[in-house]
Amino acid sequence: MTLLIQRVLDGLFNGSIYAALAVAIAISHRATGRVNLAQGEIGLFGGYIALAMASPAASFVAGAALFSNLPGHPFNLWVSTLFAVVIAAAVAVILQGVVMRDFGESTPQRALNRSIALLICVSAVISSQWGGRARIFGELFPSDGNAYINVLGARLRYTTLGAWALVLIACGLVHLFMTRTKAGLSFRALTDNRGGSVLVGIHPKRLMAIGWGISGALAALAASLAASMSLLDSSLMFRTLIYALAAVTLGGFDSLRGAVVGGIIVAQAQTMIPGYLGLPSEMSIVAALIVLVAVLVFRPWGLFGQRPVERV
Amino acid sequence: MSKSVSRVLGAGLVVVALVILPLLLSQNDLRNFARFLALVLAVLGVNIALGAGGIVSLGQSVFVGVGAFALVVFADDVGLPILVALPLAALFTGLVGVVLGFPSLRVRDSQFALVSFGYAIAFPPFARWCRSITGGPSGRSLERELTPPSWIPVEDLVYRYLITMLVILICMVIAANFLQSRWGRATKAQRDNSLSAATFGVPIAKTRSAVLGLSAALSGVSGALGVILFPFVQANDFNVFMALRLYAAAVIGGLSSALGALWGVLSLWLFPLIGEFVGLGGGADFVFGLTVLLLSYSQIDGVVGAIRAISAAISRRRTG
């Protein structure tokens, strides 16, 4: 019983990462109606920016020399992460404006090629700048031996609590933006009825940029959380992306709540399936893939999405 | 260029490749050249699935890997001669392609892209886990070697090179004929409009399965040839970066003709050189990404499309 609770609690941490990236994918999907495969890499770029800011200039992290001229370097990891989230959002906005201008309007094949191209480019930049060995990111939350709460004999770590607090705050801010601001209202109008909202004077370009910015920021948060738990390496977000894609599919592509719940479910499957079948932990990615395929085949609109009406 | 002239030119190139290159190149260069050329079939797999079938296969590295491991298993564990194991490996990979392609019968093409991308990411850990087949993380080597029969007076490596060339040629001809055949036309019909294709009696599911199987089998041959030429194989070689590169190469080569795969492989060789020349270092992939990006803004179908457009412009000028 304790083992079961422990596995549930362990799965929760990864759930926060997948939820953040899944929400990011859902928002950029809302903005453009297309899945952005480069989402994870944009976040990873942010993660490396955070690392470069937090590293002493003498270390061999590219970009650290750039930041070392600023007063107060090396920065606190929290300051660096916050800055990296902003940078990732800015990068996403710029990419949207320059490269992905008509991402939403072009044919699916063209849009897919473009997001694959973006994925290859960002990944190439990352691996040429910071590739090679994995790097220690540092810890955002206290994680020594005593940093846990006892739950029926199992350990709920502060890292898990902190990660969820961050992700929920971020999602709460997004929710507030969507429901309480005029831009958020136009954003929702745009996702519901693209043609109609353009007719009443909404600028899709600006809103698409905002959507990409938010999702870039969330992806950077996901990357920083993932890196703080393990190591920062250049293929970190490929693995995470599959879990997040499974999560966002499970949640129904447009639903933010669905993306968070999907993240939790996928992360639970990730710890439970290898744990109880006696498989190595890296096999859990196959479990995520099976979830992805099963949902797409049997319930393509997900748990929270709306079943599309086919008009003939 | 008239058709007969281009045919003579093509035949000349093949002769040069078959006879003169083995005399000119060192053993090592010849091996690398052949390994490189074997990738044509992997790119051809993407080319056929996407170009003819309209099915985005981002996970072609999986089939290259399956083909490679299948050859090692058939040759070493089962104990078959290499030349028997090769078609069996292709057949097996084709079956794997049909099975893994099953979701593409049920979901939209843009969603199958995600699934196949997942295949590419999940394959290395999965293959490492199948330790008895793949040798785990350290990989395994091919013990049985392909040696020429006594009546062919060439060195081992030259023989392997010639076999590689022959197999590539056969596969290219099969692919080209498939595209011209009834099945090929059915494949293109369901790509353009699956509803109207079904109305005209095209069995959509069978056609898509067939094209995915063929695409996977071609890529499997590519992987198997790779092991024959260099008898060592490791799960980590068939990673997501290989998958992305193969996809990019197919798009860059052009999707409207099987020849696009040849041009695509040329880009696999050329772009790292360009990347080095410009000073990107390990950023050769950046050139791939940038090219795919630029192509996605234009209506040009890769190198094949560009050549077609240029020759059309020339002949228009000539006729005035």
Image: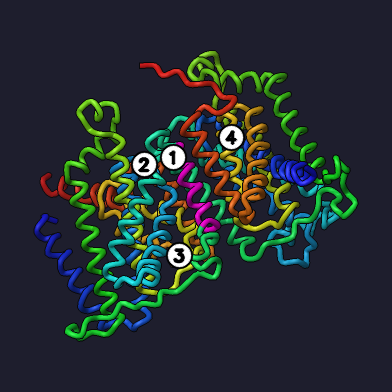
> Which label sits in the foreground, 4 or 3?
4
As helix, strand or loop, the secondary structure at mark 2 comes to loop
- Residue under numbered circle 1: B112
Question: Residue A73 vs residue B313: left or right?
Answer: right
Coordinates of residue B41 in the picture (x, y in percent): 31, 59
The answer to whether residue B280 of the structure is visible from this angle is no
Q: Are marks 1 and 2 in contact (CB under 8 Å)?
A: yes
Q: Say what amino acid the circle numbered 3 marks.
A: Pro
Q: Chain of mark 1?
A: B
User: Which image quadrant for residue A5?
Assistant: top right
Q: What numbered label is drawn on residue B55?
A: 2
Q: What separation in Å lies between label 1 and label 3 (alpha carbons)?
A: 29 Å
Q: Chain of mark 2?
A: B
Q: What numbered label is drawn on residue B272?
A: 3
> Which label sits in the foreground, 3 or 2?
2
Q: What separation in Å lies between label 4 and label 3 (alpha carbons)?
A: 35 Å
Q: Chain of mark 4?
A: A
Of residues A223 and B168, the one drawn nearer to the viewer in this rendering:
B168
Of residues A103 and B258, the one drawn nearer to the viewer in this rendering:
B258
Same subunit: marks 1 and 2 = yes
Region of the chain picked out in magenta, as a range: B111-126
Q: Are marks 1 and 4 in contact (CB under 8 Å)?
A: no
Coordinates of residue B184 in the picture (x, y in percent): 22, 43
The answer to whether residue B141 of the structure is visible from this angle is yes
